Image: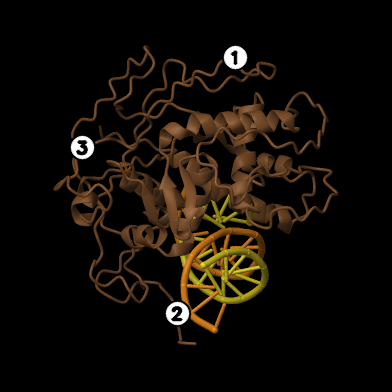
Chain colours: A brown, B yellow, C orange
Amino acid sequence: MAAPPPTVTGGDSSKHHAYSRKQKSLGLLCSNFLCLYNRDGITSIGLDDAASRLGVERRRIYDIVNVLESVGVLARKAKNQYTWKGFEAIPKALKELKDEGLKENFSSFDGNDDSKVSDDEEDDERISDTRTESQPDKLNPSLNLKSSASSKPENRREKSLALLTQNFVKLFVCTSVDLISLDEAAKLLLGDAHNSSIMRTKVRRLYDIANVLSSMNLIEKTHTSDTRKPAFRWLGFGGRGQSEHNISAHESVVTESKKRPFGADITNISFKRNKMDLGESLNMNFSKQKQVKQESYVDEIDRITFDEDSNESTKSYQFGPFAPVTIARVGASENNPRKVHDLEKLATIYRPQYQNQGKVSIIS
DNA sequence: ACGTCCCGCCAGGTG
DNA sequence: CACCTGGCGGGACGT
């Protein structure tokens, strides 16, 4: 036991900037992650590589990766290695989730109830591409919401975060519920056993998930009509940011990637204690501006069919490229499709679109 | 005071 | 056995 450096208050070195939790939030980290790996043709993603680049511990990467994988953006390839599927993989993943959810009992929340708990664990066909023969099935979680009673060992792996993420998404995709608070979601997802701690932990996880999903603009934090209880609204697609793909015809928004608005960069990121390694790359300063892009979601953002009966009718997902803002120019060198070492450059150009709820700082 | 949620301990899993 | 994964909850930060 090496006496770990206790305390953190104030940093012992130079400026003792009161670090903000917001700057280390999963949501922001996710934005950085997305921005970092969405550029050019990135195929593989190393976890420790990401951790180093983002200046966070591995543990946090797992959190992000698990939720990203749940929506199809990433796919586990091997140890420490993930495959970047891209945002374009989201629609498909969502559809699968929806399909799965409908087969189960996700269609009974809010308003109507339909306790039709079909425990059918039928293996849905995976439209997925890569099919590793190692694990034929098992990919499908057996969502045992309430009344599970079956202590089926099932998958020891993927217990919470990934599973919970999918269930959370199913909630939106399979029902007409567009707005929901995490408490509600927690209750729904774990049945009714609101036994103190269990639910508290659940909610904690949901916060993590919601933050990541928010950074992707799949959901947004708002509040219920009554105004009071914060809740999350499903957006599906509708992020702003230009895209190379054509969007719906009615995207009047210019989504022009104008040059970054003033650079109010805040150098943050790991300044605390780091791992043993990570010495060469001092701290890369990520220029991040807490800009609140309050884009008007005019038009119909359109979410995947909210009709409960419509099975496979509207499959045209107009995924709007909610790509984290553009600017795909990599400074330097195109001769390295795989790895990008220019952290500094990358960091400089990168611009996360942190979604800030609540106040709206006019900056654009 | 309560809502949000970061940090990292430590237990399984895997090679 | 070392290392990778990731559940889980304390308790600090935010409002």
The residue shown at (66%, 56%) is A201
| Residue A104 position by quadrant | top right
CB atoms of marks 3 and 1 within 8 Å: no
CB atoms of marks 3 and 2 within 8 Å: no
Q: Is residue A149 left or right of residue A91?
A: right
What kind of element bears circle 1?
Answer: loop
Q: Position of residue A91 (x, y in %)?
A: 50, 29
For disc 3, the chain is A
Q: Which image quarter holds the C terminus of chain A?
A: top left
Specify few, some or many for label 1: CA neighbours under 10 Å numbering under 14, 14-19, or 20 or more: few
What kind of element bears circle 3?
Answer: loop
Q: Earlier in the sequence, mark 3 or mark 2?
A: 2
Q: Position of residue A258 (x, y in %)?
A: 20, 30
**Residue nearer the viewer, A296 or A236:** A236
The residue shown at (77%, 50%) is A194
Whether A8 is drawn above or below A343: the answer is below
Q: Earlier in the sequence, mark 1 or mark 2?
A: 2
The residue shown at (21%, 37%) is A261
Q: Give the residue pinned by disc 2.
A: A6
State the mark number for residue A261: 3
Find the distance from the CA under tag 1 to the CA under tag 2: 57 Å
Find the distance from the CA under tag 3 to the CA under tag 1: 42 Å
